[in-house]
Image (cartoon, rainbow, N blue to C red):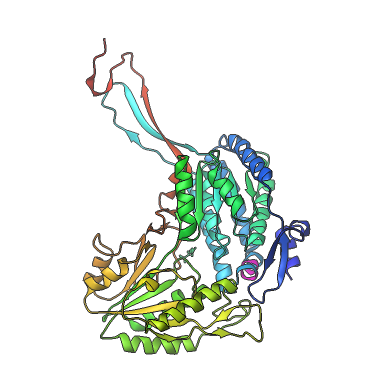
Amino acid sequence: MIDSIMQRLGVGADQYRDGDIRVTTPIDGRELGRVRSASRDEVDQAIADAQTAFAAWRRVPAPRRGELVRLFGEQLRRHKADLGALVTWECGKILQEGLGEVQEMIDICDLAVGQSRQLFGLTIASERPGHHMRESWHPLGPVGLVTAFNFPVAPWAWNAALALVCGDSLLWKPSEKTPLTALACQALLERAMAEFGDEAPAHLSQVILGEREAGEQLVNDPRVPLISATGSTRMGRQVGPAVAARFGRSILELGGNNAMILTPSADLDMAVRAILFSAVGTAGQRCTSLRRLVVHRSIKDEVVERLKQAYAGVTIGDPLEGHLIGPLIDRQAFDAMQSVLTQAREQGARVFGGQRQLAEHYPDGYYVAPAIVEVAEQNDLVRHETFAPILYVLGYDELDEAIALNNDVPQGLSSCIFTTDVREAETFVSAVGSDCGIANVNIGPSGAEIGGAFGGEKETGGGRESGSDVWKTYMRRQTNTVNYSRELPLAQGIKFD
Ligand code: UN1
């Protein structure tokens, strides 16, 4: 099955049949392939090659660079079904979401193609006669991309599509849990490059397979001016300072602990559907997954009851076969979830669900019933991100209290309010409302579109990816002052003779 998919995507069996990294599917723990870690010297050479590629690529006019991304988008359209299925095989998210991830890639390619004709700078009024001032945006250099297992392809594409139109070369270190999808994306990009012709230099995009050391090497190398890393806050705590220590730039997309405030005026039918998708979707393994429900005390019992009913109706099973919940990524994820649920019980929380499912059928697949955990207060357990389908429920009386709870966690990625009261909605998205990078009204916290800037504050890392003016991060800004007069007036009126 995997072989025919890989073949259609253009990945030769030699690339995934042999090596030190064993790739398994979370569906049933079966081995999908083996890949080889790059050695230190190979990573070093890859960085040198990326520099050479950059030197050539930056000379290609930006709208032409956009043409390469357009061709890549065409490849993705053509191979959406296969790549989406491969995402499901490798990380276990349900097929609908695997396909959704590929759609996000297509969408960002479209955005980047348009952007390639709009890398605008400003013209600025000079205080001196006969002078022009302007801002130019130039390509930056090789971009190092570190991605996580839960979204094995889309975040790479958000960065890659923009970086390519901005004139940068790419070095991608995917999660060691999901290297096959990375090889597939690389193969599709190489097809687009072949169609595009010689203007696309060799090594414009490279995949570096390996464990943590390979990523560290990229992060520490001054020849890589920008590191964009998605993963845990623990990983970001190492990447951020390491890149800063060499004055590099980083985009960090780290943990989230996303809340929904559910008010008495909310449309509860909509809210329950939104909670279900955002808390249970991707088996709770999105950085934008809903983890905390802050619900008004007057409707709390009713909402919890409705959620329990909704949870009971969700089917759990093979993610390729139309169920709504697939497996967790691996045993460690399962153990971490169980340990958190045990602690919650010990602290007196009321826990619904959370048990392992289908263990006889899939001894090496970790399927779980999603859990609802009613807690009395927002303690350390709740404030910590557990990458599993656990939804904490907290009550509130006044909106201020709910907003304070929303904000009183170390992370600051996504958030939302369900209300039909315009005062409440506008307060939530105002300067004194949610402190997150994403704040939604009557929409869950996950499933962001690529048109906006994606990312969050505090321990989420502060990075932004995708739309809005994020392209600027992949370029270097240059301020130009041009004197077209025959005089040499100094700024600030200084006389120097
Ligand atoms: C992630 O979970 O790492 O907003 C990214 C969303 C997706 C991206 C999530 N567009 O849920």
Q: Which residue extends farthest front?
A: 346
Q: In this view, does 132 lie to the left or right of 276?
A: left
Q: In this view, does 90 lie above or below 267?
A: above
Q: Quadrant of the C terminus?
A: top left
Q: What stretch of residues is rendered in magenta?
A: 85-89
Rendered location of residue 229, percent (x, y): 51, 54
Q: Which residue is drawn at 65% across and 62% down?
A: 79
Q: In this view, does 12 lie to the left or right of 385?
A: right
The mark total stands at: 0
Q: In this view, does 493 lie to the left or right of 188?
A: left
Q: In which quarter of the image is the N terminus?
A: bottom right
Quarter location, residue 308: bottom left
Q: Which of 57 and 254 is in front in this view?
A: 254
Q: Residue at x 61, y 50 (%)?
A: 214
Q: Residue at x 67, y 61 (%)?
A: 180
Rendered location of residue 116, percent (x, y): 50, 45
Q: Is residue 224 above or below residue 96?
A: above
The answer to whether any part of residue 200 appears in the image is: no
Rendered location of residue 468, percent (x, y): 41, 52
Rendered location of residue 390, percent (x, y): 45, 77
Magenta-colored segment: predominant secondary structure: helix
The answer to whether any part of residue 278 appears in the image is: yes
Question: Residue 355 in magenta?
Answer: no
Q: Which of 166 and 340 is in front in this view?
A: 340
